[in-house]
Amino acid sequence: MDPWSESESKRAHDPIFQCFSQNQNHRQPVENCCKERSVDSVVARSERSTCFWISGPIIVGAGPSGLAVAACLREKGIGSLILERSNCIASLWQLKTYDRLSLHLPRKFCELPLMPFPADYPIYPSKQQFVAYLESYAARFGISPTYNRTVVHAEYDEQLLLWRVSTRTSGTMGEEVQYASRWLIVATGENAEVVQPDIDGLQEFPGTVVHTSAYKSGSAFTGKRVLVVGCGNSGMEVCLDLCNHNAEPHIVVRDAVHILPREMLGCSTFGLSMWLLKWLPVHVVDRILLCIARAILGDTARLGLKRPASGPLELKSLSGKTPVLDVGTFAKIKSGDIKVRPDIRQISGRDVEFADGQLESFDAIVLATGYKSNVPFWLKDRELFSEKDGLPRKAFPNGWKGENGLYSVGFTRRGLMGTSVDARRIAYDIEQQWKAKGTRPDVFL
């Protein structure tokens, strides 16, 4: 007996699937299907939860990665169920980003599969334009996520040969709903939860403390002394935004950082890098980029911004740490409008003591300390994902597929380009399984 038939047989004798519908070609939303067709619905109720059998893959996360893989599946006639904890698609972009944000890479490197950006979009689309693109993308491929469903547990059932996914709905009742499918696609991404730094005295700081996920505009900090903790792209851009709103920003630089102009030699730095990598090894391209950066920016170390020993591309490949693509912040650092500070030793009241012994007073602190994956908190899997950082154990391009129908998308550390590659691979792989079963892949949910 093949694995598919074996799982069908086991489900038939499991009480939770005793209402299993023989018609897998559901063309209604799974909720409507179960509510309106009680005889054919795939629902079993208990005191604790409701369980739905999903014919196609379950996708966790309705960000760009979840939308991309759903669209690639849809192109092949395979429907899917997207579970999203928020109330909208791309919740990180819509709810947790600052107003002035735009894509740091040219739009051609940020397109999702099967649909380009509108031709009239600028080279670096704004946050609002990118969200509009994603909404159009979802509409074009008929993608309708199930919102306000937080996945709290997902585990492979060795007896039924299915993934069981438990969710909790938002609201006061917190209804628990379970789903089951042969395939589970993790699309929650590398930036699911904020990283809160452990700084002595931070909890007692009397001024405003906000993570960049809640920061919108420097207009709320006009005339104030603001300490920005973190010197990645977000930290640097928040400092520029604060400057533009007449605040007095200081930025904490703990580690060495690569700062590169966003454009070099008349083209985007990223585009130039991709072009050079066609003919030259990474270490040579890194040298070229650093030489050009030094000619444009000068010696950044003189301003407290030491460069890492590894080149920007090598460092990105090894650690996932992205170089800062400067959009004007560095000029403000050179002019003294933004002051660079070393690591924080401790905070006492409004006074911050730095590693060099200097003491400064601040009105507000912005934490540009980034995000992390939350996969280890809900997915019970030790093969595909690392329990340490919640990222695939295998580096790109080998981290997209696990065992028993488990997949990952959006964890490549290569942005939306990596997402597109993995989304296409996953859709193709699942399509082959449908073909092997001898069934047309028309499983629209």
Image (cartoon, rainbow, N blue to C red):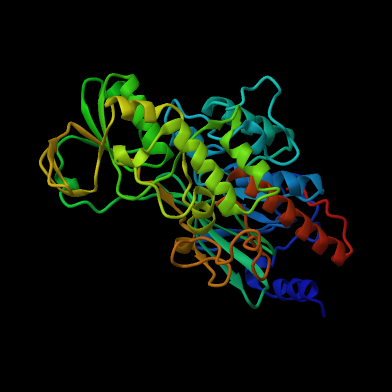
The structure residue drawn at horizontal position 61% and vertical position 26%, both measured from the top left corner, is 123
Q: Position of residue 384 (x, y in %)?
A: 58, 67
Report whether residue 236 is seen. yes
Q: Position of residue 348 (x, y in %)?
A: 10, 44
Report whether residue 60 is seen. no
Question: Is residue 435 found left or right of 152 in the rendered image?
Answer: right
Q: Position of residue 201 (x, y in %)?
A: 15, 49
The structure residue drawn at horizontal position 59% and vertical position 30%, both measured from the top left corner, is 265
How many numbered dots are placed on residues in this image?
0
Instruction: State whether residue 31 is above or below residue 294.
Output: below
The structure residue drawn at horizontal position 57% and vertical position 43%, both measured from the top left corner, is 63
Judging depth in this view, the residue of 357 and 298 nearest the camera is: 298
The structure residue drawn at horizontal position 73% and vertical position 35%, both measured from the top left corner, is 115
Question: Is residue 336 found left or right of 104 in the rendered image?
Answer: left
Can you name the residue that lies furthest to the bottom here? 1
User: Within the image, what quadrant is residue 349 found in?
Assistant: top left
Judging depth in this view, the residue of 95 and 309 nearest the camera is: 309
Judging depth in this view, the residue of 239 and 400 nearest the camera is: 239
Instruction: State whether residue 83 is above or below residue 226.
Output: below
Q: Position of residue 45 (x, y in %)?
A: 58, 61
Quadrant in which the N terminus is drawn:
bottom right
